[in-house]
Amino acid sequence: MSWLNPEQKTLDTRAADATLSAMSSQASQARNIRTPGLLAWLRLVRVFQKVDRASSDSLRCRQLSPAQLDVLAKVGSAEGISQQELADALLVTKGNVCQLLDKMEGNGLLERRPDGRVNRLFLTDQGRQVHDDVVPRHDTLLAEQFSTLTEDEQRELLRLLRQLDHALERA
């Protein structure tokens, strides 16, 4: 640009600045477009956080975390499940499950029984009592959280979430 006179450089710089400013403004506007999918995602996260908070609060008196409740519920409904099957069912890593199981085994809620190369999981008598007390109450709490929707609306929500879940599995 050395061949341009100083006045021309200034005009070119102003034009470039104006172009960049317009592009920046367009990009900013594009980021602020709230599509129905984005709004649904944000609302889903918000609803999840509220339900999760209520769930955590109800479990605190039993000194259980939501993750431990998930383990109790899954092992309670499928005694003899392997650690890997549990990890797969809960969508977590085997390492995360091991930490949970170590703590729950230490608290006397479940036991691991070797079966060849895998550990099978079983509730202890104490674990069964906690399961039988906490899981039904927790299920009732969750049902109450969704009671603002009619049964048909709940079914429709379930259908839509299942459809989205299956589509994301294929992606």
Image (spheres, helix red, strand yellow):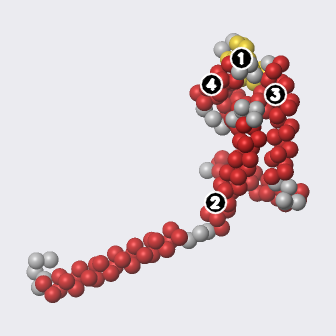
Secondary structure found at label 4: helix
Secondary structure found at label 3: helix
- Foreground mark, 3 or 2? 3
Look at label 3 and name its amino acid.
Answer: Val
Per the image, the residue denoted by label 3 is 130
Per the image, the residue denoted by label 4 is 98
Count all numbered tags in the image, as a single digit. Answer: 4
Q: Tell me how far mark 1 sits from mark 2, CA to CA.
A: 39 Å
Say whether residue 36 is left or right of residue 9: right
- The residue positioned 72% from the left and 37% from the top of the image is 60
Look at label 1 and name its amino acid.
Answer: Arg
Per the image, the residue denoted by label 1 is 112
Secondary structure found at label 1: strand
- Label located before the other in sequence (2 or 4): 2
66, 59: nearer the viewer = 59
**Quadrant of residue 63 in the image?**
top right
Per the image, the residue denoted by label 2 is 42
Residue placed farthest to the right in the image? 151
Q: Tell me how far mark 3 sits from mark 4, CA to CA.
A: 20 Å
Look at label 2 and name its amino acid.
Answer: Leu
